[in-house]
Structure formats: C-alpha cells, structure tokens
C-alpha cells in the first residue's frame, strides 16, 4: 500500500540583526505497516541588515525513511551561499533520530 500527503511549512522570521524566510515541502508514503519514506525539498533566504554582502540563500534536497514512530533517518544535500561567501558551496548531511 502506497499513499501519501503533502506538507508545506512556510516560515518567516524577523528577529535581531537579520530577516529569514524558509519553505519546506515533504511527501510521506507508506511502505507496509511500519515503514514510511519520502522526499524533502526546501529553500531559504537570509538577509543581514547593515552589510554589503548581507544576502544568503540555500536550496535543500533530501529523503527521509521512518520506521514506526521510533526511528528516522534523513539524507540531505544543500547548495548554499551564506552571507559573506563569494560563491555557493555544497554540503551533505546524514541525520539519525529516535524516540525513547
């Protein structure tokens, strides 16, 4: 049985010396009784107030694998230009989470 839903979580933050905006979209597909999997897409922008190189951005692509409600594994790739960087850079992360 494969089913899914779309979750979009836009966020805007204006606090301290910066303004940030984030948008994340993810789908969740059931793979049997205990497993779920889905892609994650995201984008964010950051603007520091008062600087010449004060704008940054990032795009995120990843996949999440869940087992029941206790285990979560996420593989994520990011291409970002942070404030002050002259060129965009790539990063890869593996995140592991569980509930006790």
Image (cartoon, rainbow, N blue to C red):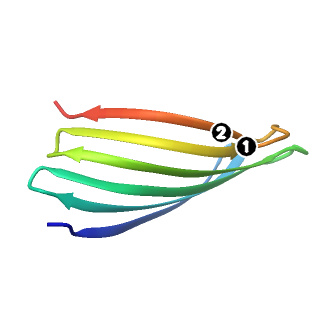
Q: Secondary structure at mark 2?
A: strand
x and y percent of residue 6 in the render?
Answer: 35, 69
Instruction: Say which residue appears at 65% left-offset and 46% top-offset.
Output: 79
Q: Which labelled disc corresponds to residue 27?
A: none
Q: Position of residue 72 (x, y in %)?
A: 28, 40
Q: What is the quadrant of the N terminus in the image?
A: bottom left
Q: Residue at x 81, y 41 (%)?
A: 87
Residue 88 in the figure: left or right of residue 69: right
Along the line of sight, which residue is nearer the eye, 28 or 56? 28
Look at the picture and state if 97 lies above or below 48: above
Residue at 34% x, 56% y is: 38
Q: Earlier in the sequence, mark 1 or mark 2?
A: 1
Binning the other alpha carbons within 10 Å of mark 1 as few (below 14), some (14 to 19) or many (20 upward) gives few
Q: Residues within 10 Å of mark 2 (few under 14, many from 20)?
A: few
**Residue 14 relative to residue 24: left or right:** right
Q: CA distance from mark 1 to mark 2?
A: 25 Å
Q: Position of residue 93 (x, y in %)?
A: 49, 34
Q: Nearer the viewer, mark 1 or mark 2?
A: 2
Reply above or below: 24 against 97: below
Asked whether, in this view, residue 41 is left or right of residue 43, the answer is left
Q: Tell me the quarter of the image containing the C terminus.
A: top left
Q: Which residue is mark 2?
A: 90
Q: What kind of element bears circle 1?
A: loop
Farthest residue to the right: give it.
52
User: Which of the 4 image quarters holds residue 91?
Assistant: top right
Tell me where residue 74 appears, x and y as whole percent. 38, 41
Q: Which residue is the site of mark 1?
A: 17
Tell me how many marks there are: 2
Q: Give yes or no for contact between labels 1 and 2 (Cβ–Cβ under 8 Å).
A: no
Q: Residue at x 8, y 55 (%)?
A: 33
């Amino acid at each position: 049985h494969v089913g899914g839903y779309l979750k979009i979580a836009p966020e805007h933050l204006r606090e301290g010396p910066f303004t940030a905006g984030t948008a994340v979209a993810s789908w969740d597909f059931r793979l049997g009784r205990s497993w779920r999997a889905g892609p994650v897409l995201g984008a964010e922008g950051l603007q520091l107030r008062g600087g010449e190189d004060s704008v940054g951005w990032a795009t995120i692509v990843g996949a999440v694998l869940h087992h029941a409600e206790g285990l979560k594994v996420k593989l994520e790739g990011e291409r970002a230009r942070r404030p002050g960087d002259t060129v965009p850079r790539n990063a890869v992360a593996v995140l592991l989470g569980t509930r006790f």
